[in-house]
Image (cartoon, coloured by chain):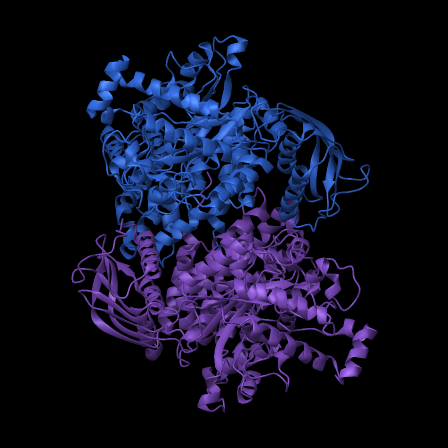
Chain colours: A purple, B blue
Amino acid sequence: MKITAGCLRLAVVAVWVLSTFLSGRAQEPSASVLSTNRMNLMPVPASIKMQAGRLPVTGGFSVATRGYSDDRLRSGISRMIARLAGRTVFSLSYDLATNENTATLVVQCERAGEVVPSTSEDESYRLEVTDKQARLVAPTVIGALRGMETILQLLQGDRDGYYLPAVEIQDQPRFPWRGLLIDVGRHYEPMEVLKRNLDAMAAVKLNVLHWHLSEDQGFRVESRKFPRLHTMGSDGLFYTQEQVREIIAYARERGIRVMPEFDIPGHATSWLVGHPELGSAPGPYKIERDAGIFEPALDPTRETTYKFLDVFLGEMAALFPDAYIHIGGDENEGKQWDRNPQIQAFMKEKGIKDNHALQAYFNQRVLKILQKHGKKMIGWEEILHPDLPTDALIHSWRGPASLAEAAKKGYNGILSAGYYIDLIYPASQHYRVDPLPENTNLTAAEAKRVLGGEATMWGEWVSPETIDSRIWPRTAAIAERLWSPRTVTDVNDMYRRLAVISRQLEELGLTHEKNYDMLLRRLAGNNDPAPLRTLASLIEPVKEYKRYQVRPQTMLSPLTGLVDASRPDSETARHFSLAVDDFVADAPRFAVHRRGINDTFADWHRSGLALNPLIDRSPALQEARPLANNLMDIARIGQEAMAYLSAGEAPTTQWRDAQLAKLNEAAKPKAALEFVVIPGVRKLVIAAAELSQLNSTNAEEWKKRVTALAEAGTK
Amino acid sequence: MKITAGCLRLAVVAVWVLSTFLSGRAQEPSASVLSTNRMNLMPVPASIKMQAGRLPVTGGFSVATRGYSDDRLRSGISRMIARLAGRTVFSLSYDLATNENTATLVVQCERAGEVVPSTSEDESYRLEVTDKQARLVAPTVIGALRGMETILQLLQGDRDGYYLPAVEIQDQPRFPWRGLLIDVGRHYEPMEVLKRNLDAMAAVKLNVLHWHLSEDQGFRVESRKFPRLHTMGSDGLFYTQEQVREIIAYARERGIRVMPEFDIPGHATSWLVGHPELGSAPGPYKIERDAGIFEPALDPTRETTYKFLDVFLGEMAALFPDAYIHIGGDENEGKQWDRNPQIQAFMKEKGIKDNHALQAYFNQRVLKILQKHGKKMIGWEEILHPDLPTDALIHSWRGPASLAEAAKKGYNGILSAGYYIDLIYPASQHYRVDPLPENTNLTAAEAKRVLGGEATMWGEWVSPETIDSRIWPRTAAIAERLWSPRTVTDVNDMYRRLAVISRQLEELGLTHEKNYDMLLRRLAGNNDPAPLRTLASLIEPVKEYKRYQVRPQTMLSPLTGLVDASRPDSETARHFSLAVDDFVADAPRFAVHRRGINDTFADWHRSGLALNPLIDRSPALQEARPLANNLMDIARIGQEAMAYLSAGEAPTTQWRDAQLAKLNEAAKPKAALEFVVIPGVRKLVIAAAELSQLNSTNAEEWKKRVTALAEAGTK
């Protein structure tokens, strides 16, 4: 019979290894205390004081409001109750309690908060939980919404039922601008994708949806003034103005701003399909299908361009209530400008010395248009130019240093360098990036100009099926960086909490967890996907922009390959690597995790064996065959190294060199995927090879040497 | 480390057991030939002839059209290409080929098919695949759409790549009315739920969405004539008329009719919230929150009721282009009528002798209104009455016999009795129900009046998260019953194909597979859900209407409990039961599947052990604790029986009686869930207890005796 869910034996092993590992770590007292205090909260609040006691959460859970109340608050309370009910399976009442004294939770606000969410919104709240009652006090409804997300994260359960631990939390964000850019230009995303991501943003207290609405590959918003923009530039995949309003209202309900981006003068091919007259070359233009940087750019020398932009941006300024409109401004190389004699003549006439200056001229004109329509301008840092007035906001993709530089010049700015989640780096890496690092030399006034940051979900390689797994859970770590105090930097604790938050995000309809298995099932066709699951847990998509280089596709290609199913930030690899560290650190006994690591290698080997016949039956997996073979090599090398270490007997240097060479071969990307468990295996090989040194040096020295050698090999 | 995907060992066992089992079955030649011919097609076409050869499907796959073509056909082709691309990971071209001779597939239509899909649509097609080309010929675009779904199901892959097997298919439906009722009255379902289910319907060639739009618990469609209907009767959860048109257009694109139901005069509490003047008692009324049959009914004696219905149904007749409007008419017990003196006086005055006659009077009046607005009437079989004209259509929830009776009286009818998928019966049970059984005594003309049937997804206990798993994959088996020849009845082959189709349905965004694990993860909280997964694979929700009786909830309760995560038609239980059958049939050796069955019991026991601490940490699982304890009992009993059988030594009758008593105890529903593996374990207990008879009788006799005793015990 098919035992669909019978992974017990290995699951037991996994739990054993993991718990051993974690209890090992728990010996560091400070980390342990931190973990307790932070519970499963993400972002960590500004201040938490644990108290004695707990407030039971039962089927009688009730909420009363006090002070100011409105529809937004009541909807927020209803959503919180629905999520509490979903998690506890209690049939909770959705009616507000009339008696404040007996309510489980009292929510007390002073005022509505701003009609249009803005950077000056007060998002603070105070939450006090005793064994009698929980009390959430906030100056604004937005603060109360933030506090309710904290309550949902506080919920815990044990043999005696669900409860909120007694606690005093005082919380407010470190930065007022905490955003997520979603690029719907390259790949369109349906309304429900945006909505569930707005819910997830609210859950981790992000407050700006940066909606990247136009690209070379698509113009995604209905323009009633210039309908050729969306009808000819979008393949029919655009948002109607009614849908735009729906998204804005949905975001507003959650205290989230919606800032549109219309990327100009470059990244604008899709505009030119219906309006070639705006281009710097005659056209005709077609919607771009490839990834990369393309030549088409608006013609900044013609008055008709500005007339067009005046009408268009006026229309959009009325549609989007946010104070800012993002004009992009990035990656225009000006090749069309160079080749256009009219543009060259214009530059000469006006004394515009280069393309950067020409773009600055363009930006000035656009800035005036935006100002006329009551909007502030924001653009990528290319827009920085001595002529740029300081009320423009700089969006940095270069880094905190250039942001600091802009701040010194008087510009407000936000950071996205370091938060490019499309580059497939682990959460830990994003987590370490601080928009305002400790050692900055900014004055207090200058530092205040650093408003925050945005994770950027560039859309080259995401579909509605995969986008959630590219955004979540890693973006929750970025959200913490932007909300929590600078001192919250414990990576292990972040990962511990991230795993919990990731599951909670599923309550909101997010598919980052469930589509992983679904995509693997699809790739396995009618066959058992188990061995594929093992492989997928050990690999990640290649980083940065390598994917397109090694496995080119177009915007019309299916995003259903193994590279799409695989996810960034392999949890298996992280745990494996930590287990290997502990095992090697246990020299000369080599007992810690020995059984778990051996079982793991045996599992990898079995999976490698099972993959080849699976690939035979599923041609979509053909490209994964070298990975399957690598997997068997890696497992065998690991097993051999473990055997040497367990026996306390060093292998020959020939053996070492041969294995390291094979690992280097296995480390090379295939199918735009790469193994992320090789450093751990390499460490085992080095450790085995260095066994002979273990008697002559002290164990501490030996461990350092092994680690250094293993890391040197990684480069 | 956590080995997220390391279920290899047990997976290998499972594959071994399953393949042994299947190869055993393959000895029946006729079944085997059937399986080959039917490949993975569902519904099975009217006629299939396998040919030699195969047509490779490569990245160069192309489609040309010939004859009639329109937007609907081109959209259908694009959707087919997208799904082919998604499955094969080929970057296929979406442009139609210009050269018919070199295209991989030629689609040839004669005409558009009907503007509004109807029961007289020609859905037939002919598909010929050679090693050179595939050719799909259909009189209408709808036939071509049906044929393209067949092509997608034909796709196979092996070491040499993807291909379509050479084949000649001639296909048309057995019945013209093949529907799925979705009740959005009791629980609202968002647009994307409806859309993905329409896609799934098209995939299995269903052609009617029966949209049950009003209920005691909700009035779900915007009425511009009477806005109090939806504003006061829906909690804000209704479809705007624009959304209704969107669904109709989406369905039409897929050759699916959308027939609305407005259930009257009963099941109408939600109407009366905003319009108490329509009720048969003074009111006020509130939206009903419970499940069941309720008293409120429209007042059939007041002319104002018919004036209202004239305006309202006129509005809906204009909104819904389908020829039919369903008026429900079910389960009105007339209690309000009995108590209303005015209604009693009216009946006396008109000589209306009972409530059934009064409802017949009401139906006559409604029929005239519908006729005035150009619609045909359909209602549940309660509307049958001597006065009912034969152009009304009868929707049977009683069974094929009453449908036949209606047909004899001249009424067209459709069957839903036997297709109530909300009752949680296995697909095999629905599959056996035929709207027009072989032994019917209808004339050919009468038989033609049986138009088909509908699966009914009544909405008491479904949420957007769970509805797909209640509809799919079982509804695909019903779809086959309604499309394929009557002779297609092999249950094992149906299940074999159903497993394949179920995975393919995931391509359309269906969540029936992926939300299973998600709901279990949520219930497990921050803990490893593996043991819960094992338990969930062995249980099913209680059948029929027992759930509400044993575990009452309201329409506002969360549908996130273990009963909601659990699914009908446990595959694990089916495989287990077949394995036990084979094992017992292998008497006196008892070797077949022995290892697999023993491993299975060991896994159940480990899971039972692991469940108690998991439940301690996840209070939402408290109600599952008796099930966890039962699981350990069941596993232990199974292990003991296996030990006796393996040793060839009979236990005492005391042992047998004690185990059977424990199994009976374990078989009782808990938390509205019941084990579905108990019959197999009971059979092992009986077999062990009967071992002493094995020497004295012949093995065949013995097996029959064991089976009979085991089945007797089930009753």
Name which quarter of the figure residue A213 lies in.
bottom right
Identify the residue at horizontal 24%, vertical 22% (top origin): B343
Question: Compared with residue B406, is residue A272 higher up or lower down, i.e. above or below?
Answer: below
Could you tell whether A286 is left or right of B636 in the image?
Answer: right
Name which quarter of the figure residue B56 lies in.
top right
Name which quarter of the figure residue B281 lies in.
top left
| Image quarter hosting the C terminus of chain A | bottom right
Identify the residue at horizontal 68%, vertical 73% (top origin): A331
Q: Provide residue A477's location: percent of width, then percent of height.
A: 45, 70
Could you tell whether A550 is left or right of B230 in the image?
Answer: right
- The reply to whether residue A588 is in sight is no
Question: Compared with residue A468, is residue A588 higher up or lower down, i.e. above or below?
Answer: below
Q: Nearer the viewer, residue B21 or A461?
A: A461
Q: Provide residue B547's location: percent of width, then percent of height.
A: 30, 36
Question: Compared with residue B597, is residue A588 higher up or lower down, i.e. above or below?
Answer: below
Q: Nearer the viewer, residue A443 or A55?
A: A443
Could you tell whether A426 is left or right of B140 in the image?
Answer: left
Question: Compared with residue B267, is residue A22 higher up or lower down, i.e. above or below?
Answer: below
